[in-house]
Image (tube, helix red, strand yellow):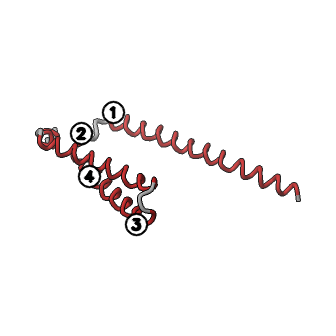
Amino acid sequence: MDSATVAVQVMITVIPIVGILMGGAVIILFLILNHKQKMAMIRHNYGSKQPIDIVWISLFAGLLLTFIGFVMSLFFIIKEGVEYSLLSGIVPLAAGMGLMIFFTIARKSGQIDKSSERKE
């Protein structure tokens, strides 16, 4: 009976270690193959890198975070009232509102017209 308990404890200890090592190996293999693919694309002059349009990404992320934060805040207010768990909804709500304010400021300063132009 004791040997089975020891075997179970060893398995419980070894499985996460092996999982972490295998996950690390998969990540390293992905990074190496992705690098080789990018180098081959550069070598053959295939494809061009598109610029990231940070202004529109901030609008999308801001809307997403605002709605998620609003729903989470509403849920925690209904479930527990005003407690510390309400911060789980207020934090994404504030982050989303901040990103939408950034979008508004960028739009008023004319940054949208400049970032929307793509080099061809």
Q: Do the residues bearing badges 1 and 3 touch, measured as CB atoms within 8 Å?
A: no
Quick check: can you spot residue 120? no
- Determine whether the residue tagged by mark 2 lies in a helix, strand or loop: loop
- Determine whether the residue tagged by mark 3 lies in a helix, strand or loop: helix
Neighbourhood count class around disc 3 (C-alpha, 10 Å): few under 14, some 14–19, many 20 upward: few
Residue at 36% across / 51% down in the picture? Answer: 92
* Badge nearest the viewer, 3 or 4: 3
Q: Which mark is residue 78?
A: 3
Q: Earlier in the sequence, mark 2 or mark 3?
A: 2
Residue 67, position as x, y percentages in the image: 30, 58
* Separation of residues labelled 4 and 2 (CA atoms): 17 Å
Residue at 45% across / 53% down in the picture? Answer: 84
Residue at 77% across / 52% down in the picture? Answer: 9
* Badge nearest the viewer, 2 or 1: 2
* Separation of residues labelled 1 and 4 (CA atoms): 34 Å
Q: Amino acid at mark 4?
A: Phe
Q: Earlier in the sequence, mark 2 or mark 1?
A: 1
Q: Do the residues bearing badges 2 and 3 touch, measured as CB atoms within 8 Å?
A: no
Q: Amino acid at mark 2?
A: Pro
* Separation of residues labelled 3 and 4 (CA atoms): 27 Å
The quadrant of the picture occupied by the N terminus is bottom right
* Separation of residues labelled 2 and 3 (CA atoms): 43 Å
Q: Which residue is mark 4?
A: 60
Q: Which mark is residue 43?
A: 1
Q: Which residue is mark 2?
A: 51
- Determine whether the residue tagged by mark 4 lies in a helix, strand or loop: helix
Q: Is residue 102 left or right of residue 13?
A: left
